[in-house]
Image (spheres, rainbow, N blue to C red):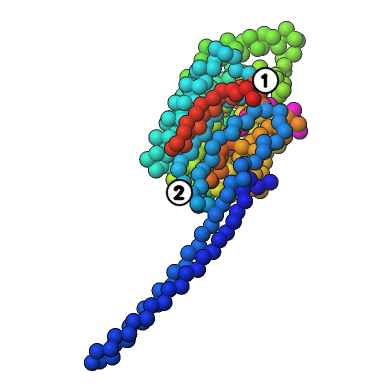
């Protein structure tokens, strides 16, 4: 369904001027001026209706048109810091975190920097913030270790860089970015990823440097409960929205009309060592293509992976749907098809934004040259 009506008007103006001057000698001057004016008018028909939904979406103003012409691209940045039933006492930290990330990414965009740099900088801030399940402070796996995944993707070139199951990198998105720009490969895991990072100037850290007491306690409590159930493999289920999902992500549009996306995560609590979620997989937790959209997801990874949800959403936008509609439709699809929960941020090349989640809360923030907003929930 299209949200716009396009009317094309063509006006052709021909002006002919002939000047003849006769003095003693004959001078003939002929001036021919042809002017061709093409006017393209796009009339917005009030936007696309949100689908009947099971989640929450946010109607966000999109790029402006002047006499039907899309105005020169102003940068846009959207970030998220996870979607789940965040308790009240964690709301402030999440809002602060996404706002700090927004500020860092925006500094890049406002000086004319690329969307790719903006999403990287925004994600680094959230990886460094212990509030989130990314970088230091992430969930621990079953062995009590932090194992991180991240992906970054450039919508202009479709180049991407991903790392999975890394244990000695404070900012896995930095390593992912190095892979994108300096490797013929797209994805590195474990030791190989860390070796690549070290060879490209990224310092390694100890795994203990990424572990914080809050997470040690959380894992201990969780495993104690599992033992009381007599089940070592006890794991939360994908439809449990009380389990925290604090994965971080960002999507951006720069002045050159390029879009990019990045996602970074510590995965899920008590995950089996070596388990990889959706976040760092192309098209699942992150995707960017100038021809469709940039998207970053959060939520239980297994259902999201099965639907290749970020690409699914981008495809809906390439087919002519508005990002706002596609984001909410993605949440419907996630719930109805695989009973999944989560959230998504999505942005197209025209600066139109979609933010949706089917969990009680999702930490997000966006900024354009005209407006900025940060939210964690909206009662609709
Ligand atoms: N999607 C992440 C994963 O499954 C978790 C999250 O979003 O919080 O690894």
Determine the image quadrant of residue 340.
top right
Residue 250 percent coordinates (x, y): 52, 34
User: Mark 1: few, some, or many residues within 10 Å (few <14, many ≥20)?
Assistant: many
Judge whether residue 227 is colored magenta.
Answer: no
Residue 212 image label? none
Horizontally, is 110 left or right of 315 in the view? left
Q: Secondary structure at mark 2?
A: loop
Residue 72 image label? 2
Determine the image quadrant of residue 51.
top right
Q: What residue is shown at x 43% (from left), y 35% (from top)? A: 106
Q: What residue is shown at x 37% (from left), y 81% (from top)? A: 18
Residue 74 percent coordinates (x, y): 45, 43
Which of disc 2 and disc 1 is earlier in sequence?
2
For the residues bearing labels 1 and 2, Cβ distance under 8 angstroms: no
Residue 284 percent coordinates (x, y): 64, 37
Q: Nearer the viewer, residue 264 or 338?
A: 338
Q: Is residue 167 visible?
A: no
Q: In the rendered view, would you say 212 is above or below 336? A: above
**Quick one: quadrant of the C terminus?**
top right
Residue 241 image label? 1
Q: Nearer the viewer, residue 224 or 114?
A: 114
Residue 77 percent coordinates (x, y): 49, 36
Which portion, as a residue range, is magenta? Answer: 337-344
Q: What residue is shown at x 59% (from left), y 46% (from top)? A: 44
């Amino acid at each position: 369904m299209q949200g716009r009506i396009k009317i094309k008007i063509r006006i052709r103006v021909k002006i002919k001027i002939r000047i003849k001057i006769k003095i003693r000698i004959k001078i003939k001057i002929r001036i021919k001026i042809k002017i061709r004016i093409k006017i393209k008018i796009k009339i917005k028909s009030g936007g696309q209706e949100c689908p009947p939904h099971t989640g929450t979406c946010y109607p966000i103003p999109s790029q402006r048109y002047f006499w039907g012409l899309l105005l020169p691209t102003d940068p846009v940045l959207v970030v998220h810091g996870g979607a789940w039933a965040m308790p009240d006492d964690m709301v402030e930290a999440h809002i602060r975190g996404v706002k700090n990330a927004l500020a860092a990414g925006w500094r890049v965009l406002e000086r004319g920097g690329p969307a790719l740099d903006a999403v990287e900088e925004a994600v680094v801030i959230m990886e460094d913030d212990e509030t989130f399940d990314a970088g230091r402070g992430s969930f621990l796996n079953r062995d009590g270790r932090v194992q991180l995944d991240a992906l970054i993707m450039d919508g202009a070139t479709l180049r991407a860089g991903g790392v999975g199951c890394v244990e000695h990198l404070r900012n896995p998105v930095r390593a992912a970015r190095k892979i994108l720009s300096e490797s013929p490969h797209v994805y590195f895991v474990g030791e190989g990823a860390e070796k690549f990072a070290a060879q490209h100037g990224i310092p390694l850290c100890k795994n203990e440097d990424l572990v914080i007491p809050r997470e040690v306690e959380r894992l201990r409590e969780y495993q104690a409960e599992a033992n009381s159930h007599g089940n070592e493999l006890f794991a939360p289920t994908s439809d449990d929205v009380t389990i925290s999902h604090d994965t971080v992500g960002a999507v951006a549009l720069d002045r050159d009309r390029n879009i990019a996306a990045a996602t970074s995560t510590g995965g899920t609590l008590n995950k089996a060592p070596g388990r990889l979620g959706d976040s760092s997989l192309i098209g699942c937790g992150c995707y960017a293509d100038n021809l469709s959209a940039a998207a970053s997801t959060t939520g239980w990874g297994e259902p999201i992976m099965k639907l290749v949800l970020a690409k699914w959403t981008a495809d809906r936008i390439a087919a002519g749907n508005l990002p706002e509609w596609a984001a909410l439709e993605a949440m419907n699809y996630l719930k109805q098809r695989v009973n999944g929960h989560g959230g998504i941020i999505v942005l197209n090349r025209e600066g139109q934004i979609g933010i949706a989640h089917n969990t009680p809360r999702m930490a997000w923030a966006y900024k354009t040259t005209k407006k900025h907003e940060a939210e964690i929930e909206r009662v609709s």
